[in-house]
Image (spheres, rainbow, N blue to C red):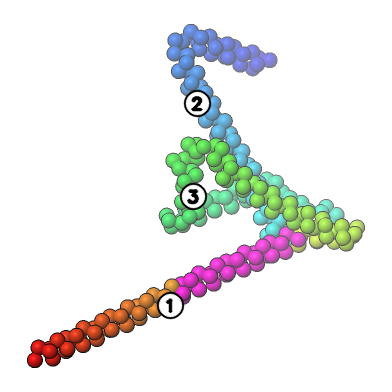
Amino acid sequence: MAGLGTVIHWITECYATYKANEYHNEIMTYMKEKAKMIAKFIYFSIAFGVVIPLLFGIAVDLFVFMPIRSFNSESGLVIYVSQNWSFGVAYMSIIHNIIHVLPANNNVRQKLNTIIGDGIMQTDVWHITKTVIIPVILIALLAINVPALTSWGILQMLDSKDPSLQVTVTIYTYPIIFCFFIAILSIFLFKNLIHLWIQIVRDDIYLIGKKLHNMKNQSENSNNESTSTIIENGVAH
């Protein structure tokens, strides 16, 4: 109660000072700007400091570490929230440092510099929300929930009541889907590399053909000029 009374007294004094000050409009504008900065800081702290690292850490744990970890069929899957959050912060720090090591003309680095600009506190909240925060959260949620729904569907088809089998199916569904995704991505990248190689070979063949064509034209022009010179000399004699 004493603390509440102190806070009320402080608010009353601030309000009285505000009313007595002739520059109250400027003070009000300044307070609104600071309130917006505080709200932006809290929002970014929750998004980049809590939600995204936690989801990222859980996703990496499920796809990479969970299959190689010993488990108890009676307790089921155990996800350590604080541990996954700390790992998620470490993963984000590593990714951030890797991006800044990339060349200055790299598309990812240029896009990050465009979004952040002079600092994350100077960015537009809605722009960074729709370009970074929402897509990252949606991708993380899909990465966590799609394999979970897949394993649930498999267990429904198997109609198994064995807890050990249920945990095993759930654990190995994540790396299998991850490997499947990597395989599709590798095929897509290989296809693009083949297309790029074909385009380079086609351009080289075109350039070689163009050079040969130009050399042929130059040779024909030289022969024509030589013939014309011989004819003119013969006429002159």
Q: Quadrant of residue 225?
A: bottom left
Task: Tell me the SS state at disc 3.
Answer: helix
Q: Quadrant of residue 22?
A: top left
Task: Tell me the SS state at disc 1.
Answer: helix
Residue on which disc 3 sits: 111
- Tell me if residue 4 comes above or below residue 224 in the rendering: above
Q: Find the distance from the CA under tag 2 to the CA under tag 1.
A: 62 Å
Residue type at the position of mark 1: Ile
Rendered residue at 54%/28% (across/down): 36
Instruction: Please give left or right for residue 134 compared with residue 151 in the image.
Output: left
- Tell me if residue 193 comes above or below residue 78 in the rendering: below
Rendered residue at 47%/15% (across/down): 25
- Residue interval drawn in magenta: 173-202
Verify whether residue 211 appears in magenta.
Answer: no
Rendered residue at 64%/46% (across/down): 137
Mark toward the start of the polypeptide (1 vs 3): 3
- Residue 205's label in the rendered image is 1
- x then y, percent, for residue 19: 51, 9
Q: Find the distance from the CA under tag 3 to the CA under tag 2.
A: 27 Å
- Residue nearest the viewer, comparing 82 with 167: 167
Is residue 188 in view from this perspective?
yes
Contact (CB < 8 A) between labels 3 and 2?
Answer: no
Image quarter (top left, top right, bottom left or bottom right) of the C terminus: bottom left
Taking the view exactly as shown, the residue that stands out farthest to the front is 235
Q: Residues within 10 Å of mark 1 (few under 14, many from 20)?
A: few
Residue on which disc 2 sits: 33
Instruction: Please give left or right for residue 110 compared with residue 11 in the image.
Output: left
Mark toward the start of the polypeptide (3 vs 2): 2
Task: Tell me the SS state at disc 2.
Answer: helix
What type of secondary structure mainly makes up the magenta span?
helix
Residue type at the position of mark 2: Glu
